[in-house]
Image (spheres, rainbow, N blue to C red):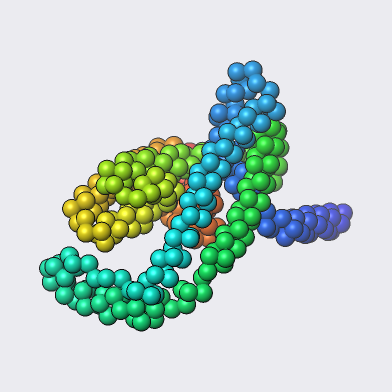
């Protein structure tokens, strides 16, 4: 009887593994949408529960929350796409002009201490001379406005499909999430025993805390730096602030935007404004990334700051932007297993 039982279990395991592999293979292109829907549902689940306790049906709460999330996502994306389409035309025109006339050397460049003459000479050789600028830009002339529009349309269509499936999945998760979580816990207990339940709760808490720590702090950085952009009288200050908020979701990502803003000020011979903006933005980002963000994530998950960073950047490297939220959850589960294994025998 034992061999027959073993063969039956082995056969069932192979069938389950084969079906799981086939399902993942079929849904591979839609896994990002499913992942984003799961992250959004876990992060906003307390709001869904609050609405249900207030008397709203699960279906009504699902429709309302999905509409709100969709609006929050689509509105900034619409602004970015619209402004991007406008800027694409300006960029193409600017490249064409540079290739014809070059870029004149700023007067202040040669006045910089120590390196001014070297930078001015390089600028004169590579940017001020039209032929040198044409060579430096390489094949930039190949990027016509039509190609910009075609590439933008292709990427936009692909992103809209992912977004549509994300919101559709999110709707069903809001509606049936309680039953799905209970079924998931039952399956995990059956496969791995009751000890798997704390791991799942730790991962859920980590995802929620990571979303709060990354998104809320990122939006805060974007809002504060937008004030700096407006005071510095930068063009497209609101768009720069939105880009800063998006990049600030990743720790130490905001400097990529505000350094470019400072360079724009320097090119416009506004050195003092560039220095003030750089100092202000650096202080804001330093406080947010080193104090506020670790406090928001670490207090809820008991994750050390190093593990938070490893999870964020490791997840980003492995899974893309979605990994920013999944990485810390994996690290939290691993750390929970370690703590369980490292507990003295007298406590088990």
The foreground one among 144 and 260 is 144
Question: Above or below — where is 242 with respect to 45?
Answer: below
**Residue found 68% across the figure and 58% down from its top:** 28
Question: Above or below — where is 54 with respect to 163?
Answer: above
**Residue found 59% across the figure and 26% down from its top:** 49
- Percent position of residue 80, x then y: 49, 49
- Percent position of residue 336, x then y: 50, 45
Q: Residue 295 vs residue 157: left or right?
A: left
Question: Above or below — where is 336 with respect to 29?
Answer: above
Q: Residue 169 vs residue 142: left or right?
A: right
Question: How many discs mark residues in the rendered view?
Answer: 0
For the question of whether residue 226 can be seen, the reply is yes
Q: Which quadrant of the structure image shows residue 292?
A: top left
The foreground one among 17 and 217 is 217
**Residue found 64% across the figure and 42% down from its top:** 167
The foreground one among 328 and 228 is 228
Q: Residue 282 vs residue 87: left or right?
A: left
- Percent position of residue 278, x then y: 25, 52
Direction top: furthest residue: 55
The foreground one among 271 and 192 is 271
* Image quarter of the N terminus: bottom right
**Residue found 38% across the figure and 49% down from its top:** 236
- Percent position of residue 161, x then y: 66, 51
For the question of whether residue 348 can be seen, the reply is no
Q: Which quadrant of the structure image shows residue 149?
A: bottom right
């Amino acid at each position: 009887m034992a061999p027959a039982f073993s063969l039956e279990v082995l056969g069932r395991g192979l069938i389950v593994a084969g079906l799981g592999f086939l399902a993942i293979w079929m849904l591979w292109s839609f896994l990002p949408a499913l992942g984003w829907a799961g992250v959004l549902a876990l992060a906003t689940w307390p709001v869904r529960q609050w609405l249900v306790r207030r008397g709203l049906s699960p279906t009504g709460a699902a429709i309302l929350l999905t509409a709100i999330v969709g609006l929050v996502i689509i509105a900034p994306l619409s602004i970015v796409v619209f402004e991007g389409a406008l800027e694409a035309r300006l960029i193409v025109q600017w490249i064409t002009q540079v290739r014809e006339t070059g870029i004149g050397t700023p007067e202040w460049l040669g006045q910089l201490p120590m390196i001014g003459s070297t930078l001015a000479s390089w600028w004169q050789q590579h940017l001020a001379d039209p032929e040198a600028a044409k060579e430096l830009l390489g094949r930039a002339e190949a990027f016509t406005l039509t190609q910009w529009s075609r590439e933008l349309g292709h990427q936009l269509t692909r992103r809209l499909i992912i977004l549509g499936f994300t919101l559709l999945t999110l709707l069903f998760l809001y509606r049936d999430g309680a039953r799905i979580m209970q079924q998931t816990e039952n399956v995990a207990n059956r496969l791995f025993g009751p000890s798997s339940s704390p791991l799942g709760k730790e991962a859920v808490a980590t995802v929620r805390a990571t979303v709060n720590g990354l998104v809320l702090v990122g939006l805060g950085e974007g809002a504060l730096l937008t004030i700096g952009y407006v005071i510095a009288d930068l063009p497209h200050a609101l768009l720069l602030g939105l880009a800063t908020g998006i990049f600030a979701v990743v720790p130490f990502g905001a400097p990529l935007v505000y350094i470019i803003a400072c360079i724009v000020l320097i090119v416009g011979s506004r050195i003092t404004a560039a220095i003030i903006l750089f100092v202000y933005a650096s202080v804001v980002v330093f406080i947010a990334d080193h104090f506020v963000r670790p406090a928001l994530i670490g207090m809820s998950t008991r994750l050390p700051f190093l593990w938070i960073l490893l999870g964020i950047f490791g997840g980003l490297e492995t899974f893309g932007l979605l990994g920013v939220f999944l990485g810390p959850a994996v690290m939290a589960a691993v750390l929970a297993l370690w703590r369980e294994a490292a507990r003295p025998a007298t406590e088990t």
